[in-house]
Image: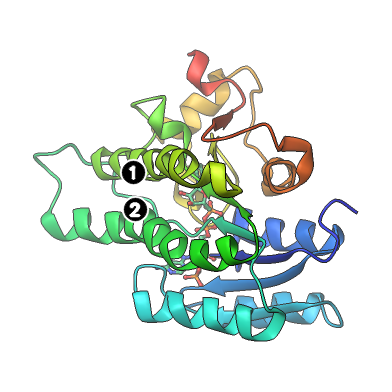
Amino acid sequence: MKLLDKVAIITGGTAGLGKATVKRFIQEGAKVVFTYGSNKASADELLGELQGKPVDAIKADVSCSDDVKKVIDFTVGKYGRIDILVNNAGTFDKRKNILELSEEEWDRVMDVNGKGVFLNCKYAIPHMLENGGGTIVNVASVATWSWNSGGTVYCCSKHVCEALTRRIARDFGPQGIKCNCINPGTIESNLTQACISNPDDLIHQVVKKVAAGRWAQPEEVANLIVFLSNSESDFMQGSPVLIDGGWSLL
Ligand SMILES: NC(=O)c1ccc[n+]([C@@H]2O[C@H](COP(=O)([O-])OP(=O)(O)OC[C@H]3O[C@@H](n4cnc5c(N)ncnc54)[C@H](OP(=O)(O)O)[C@@H]3O)[C@@H](O)[C@H]2O)c1
């Protein structure tokens, strides 16, 4: 088992990539606390599926510092430490250019995809340092490589995620924090459901052209998170890792 007895917080564990990551971490022997935004029914369903395993779910908005602290306090209270933080929770935008984009939409997406990563790292890192180190995997996007995946604010928010990854690796790598991010292409999930169900959607057209010629399943991207979370990847620091089926080559 690659994550035996490791204590992990996974944000946004009720759907898509987060849910697949929760399941893979449990399979690899980790103790998991996952968060969700609003979908309690999905959280309960996943807890039911993993009954008997070391897993907890907490409703917590990643962009609210009190909620983030609540999750961290719960985890440290229960297990005494945090070994791994996966900043997965995210939201998509309405693919607007800057003139079409409203201030409210900018704030909504930046709060979740940017500030959410900032807050979770800010409050988890001190506990990791107390225990000699820890591992952070941030979920960015191919949107930092290809300008036609999301709209203005989604692309900007994922650049924030990637920049935080590098800065944290630079600042805290020497003290034992390993921090990398992944940059997925098209994953079948709730987030992309509208694109999947509309054959005229731009992303649907892109999927036909990429080398892989298909959408990724959440599980195959979760495997990369497992790799970046265990000691096999210990020489990696501040790396953005593409897993995009070849989108960035178009
Ligand atoms: N799908 C893709 O093609 C793709 C491509 C590149 C990158 N990504 C990134 O991969 C990550 C996961 O995406 P996904 O496709 O798996 O999305 P998803 O199916 O929509 O799931 C998103 C998860 O994030 C949670 N969440 C959303 N807003 C939250 C908030 N404010 N606080 C706490 N949790 C929140 C949701 O919880 P509730 O449902 O309970 O609110 C859900 O568990 C995101 O960061 C996304 O940007 C996805």
What's the CA distance linking mark 2 and mark 1?
Answer: 6 Å
Density class for disc 2 (Cα within 10 Å; few <14, some 14-19, many ≥20) is many
User: Along the line of sight, which residue is nearer the eye, 80 or 214?
Assistant: 80
Residue positioned most to the left:
99
Q: Are marks 2 and 1 in contact (CB under 8 Å)?
A: yes
Q: Is residue 65 left or right of 104 when viewed as pictured? A: right
Instruction: Name the disc covering residue 68, or none.
Output: none
Choose top left, top right, bottom left or bottom right for residue 48: bottom right
- Examine the rendering and report whether any part of residue 105 can be seen: yes
User: Along the line of sight, which residue is nearer the eye, 164 or 60?
Assistant: 164
Residue positioned most to the top:
250
* Residue pointed to by mark 2: 114
Q: In the image, residue 226 lies at what x, y percent?
A: 73, 47
- Examine the rendering and report whether any part of residue 200 can be seen: no
Density class for disc 1 (Cα within 10 Å; few <14, some 14-19, many ≥20) is some
Residue positioned most to the right:
1
Mark 1 residue type:
Val
Up-down: is 245 above or below 75? above
x 59%, y 42%: residue: 187
| First of labels 2, 1 by sequence position | 2
* Residue pointed to by mark 1: 160
Mark 2 residue type:
Gly
Count of marks placed on residues: 2
Q: In the image, residue 111 lies at what x, y percent?
A: 29, 61
Choose top left, top right, bottom left or bottom right for residue 246: top right
